[in-house]
Amino acid sequence: MTVTASAESAASRAAEILSRPVALNGLTVPNRIAMAPMTRKFSPGGVPGEDVQSYYARRAAAGVGLIVTEGTYVGHESAGQSDDIPRFHGEEQLAGWARVAEAVHAAGGAIVPQLWHIGMVRKQGDPPYADAPAVGPSGIRLDGTEGTGRAMTRGDLDDVIGAFAEAAAAAERIGFDGVELHGAHGYLLDQFLWERTNRRTDAYGGDPVARTKFAAEIVAAVRDAVSPDFPVIFRYSQWKSEAYDARLAETPDELAAILTPLADAGVDAFHASTRRYWVPEFDGADLNLAGWTRKLTGKPAITVGSVGLDGDFIRAFMGEGSAVQGIDNLLDRLERDEFDMVAVGRALLQDPDWAAKVLAGRLDELKPYDPAALGTLS
C-alpha cells in the first residue's frame, strides 16, 4: 500500500495534537486520550479479577493516557442492579481494584474509577441486595411514571453522600489517580438534575440551581474526603438512557446555572457525554457540549460520542456495527482548544491498540466496530 504525502501529514497531525499532555488538578495525563467508561459485567460478586486487570492494562500499555473505569457501585444498598458489575466497597472488591490500578500504572497509564448510583433505574429484587428499594428524588422513573421505589428522605441523602465520599477516599487510599462521579444518563445524580424526575418541594427541588444541590453536596463531600490535588471529575449528559432527546438546559445560561455550583463545590474537570461529539449543542455556535462546558466553567472538559466511528452506540446495542470514521473534525476542535481531552468508547472496546495506532500515525490500521466485542473482555 502506498502512503501519500497528504496521508502522512494527516497522521502526523493526529499524533502531534493527541500527544500533548494535559493537567487535571494534580494529575498530568501524558496525552489527550481517555478510555470512556463502559459497563461490562465481568466481575462476579462485584470483584474485578485478573481478566479485568488485563483488560484495562492492555489499553494503558497501548497509549491511553487516562482510563476511566466502568461504573462501580458505591456502598449503598440501593446503588446497583447486578452482581456482575463491580462494586467500589468491600474488602475483596477494593483489593481487586487495587490490583487493577497497579496493573494500569505498571503499563504506563493513569486510572480513575467511575463512582455510580443508579437510583430509580433499579427494580426491587435486583441483585446484589434484592430487598433494597429503588430510591430517587421523587420516586419517579425516567418515563415520568411512579416506580416501585420511593422518594429519598434526608437520611437517605446523607447516606448516599457518605457512600460517595467513602468510595473516593478508598480510591485515593488504594492508589487510584482521581475519581469520576457518574451524574449522567438518567442515573441517581442526573435524576436530581432533571426536572422530569425531580419534583421535590424542599431545598433539593425547584429551579436548576436547587436541583443541583444534591450533586454539589456529593462533590463537596468527595472533595473534603480526598487530598486537595486529587482530581474530581464529574460526568453529565443532556440525554437519558430512556429519553435520548431529553435536555437539562436549552440555553448556555441554563447550562451555566447547573455547572457553576458543581464547579464551585470542587469539580476539577467535566466529562460531557454526547452521542455524537461533532453535533453543536446550542443554536448559533459550533461548540459541542464539552466546548460549552469549558467556556462556561473554565474547567478542563472531556468530550465523548462516537469517536472514530460513523454510528452512535444505540445502534451498537441493537446489534449494528459501525465503520471507521476520520478524526479530522476532532483534531480541529482540539487544536482550537474547544475541549481538553477525548474519551473513546467502542473503538477502544473493539481494538485495544486504537490509541497506539493513532499516536503512531497508523490510521489505515483502525478497525470497524463489531457488536460482538460487547460479549468479550479482550
Image (spheres, grey):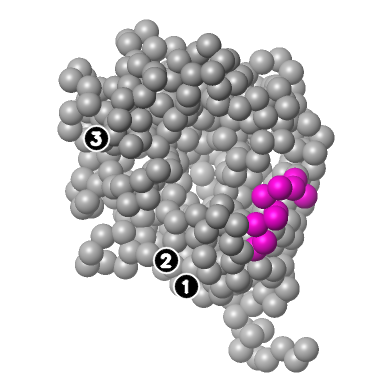
* Magenta stretch: includes residue 372: yes
Instruction: Report the magenta residues as a range.
Output: 369-378
Dot 3 alpha-carbon crowd within 10 angstroms: few under 14, some 14 to 19, many 20 or more: some
Is 60 placed above or below 365 here? above
Which is more toward the observer, 86 or 331?
A: 86
Q: Is residue 328 above or below residue 142?
A: below
Question: Quick one: 49 or 241, which is closer to the camera?
Answer: 241
Three-letter residue code for mark 3:
Glu
Element assignment for label 2? loop
Residue shown at 51% from the left, 22% from the top: 79
Q: Is residue 256 magenta?
A: no
| Label placed on residue 258 | none
Residue ID for mark 2: 278
- Whether tag 3 and tag 1 are in contact, CB under 8 A, the answer is no
Using the rendered image of the protein, determine whether residue 137 is visible from the camera's viewpoint.
no
Q: Secondary structure at mark 3?
A: loop
List the residue tagged with mark 1: 329
Mark 1 or 2, closer to the camera? 2
Instruction: Provide residue 274's location: percent of width, then percent of height.
Output: 42, 54
Kindly identify which residue carries mark 3.
195
Circle 1 — which element? Answer: helix
Please provide percent x and percent y for residue 153: 33, 11
In this rendering, the answer to whether 230 lies above or below 204 is below
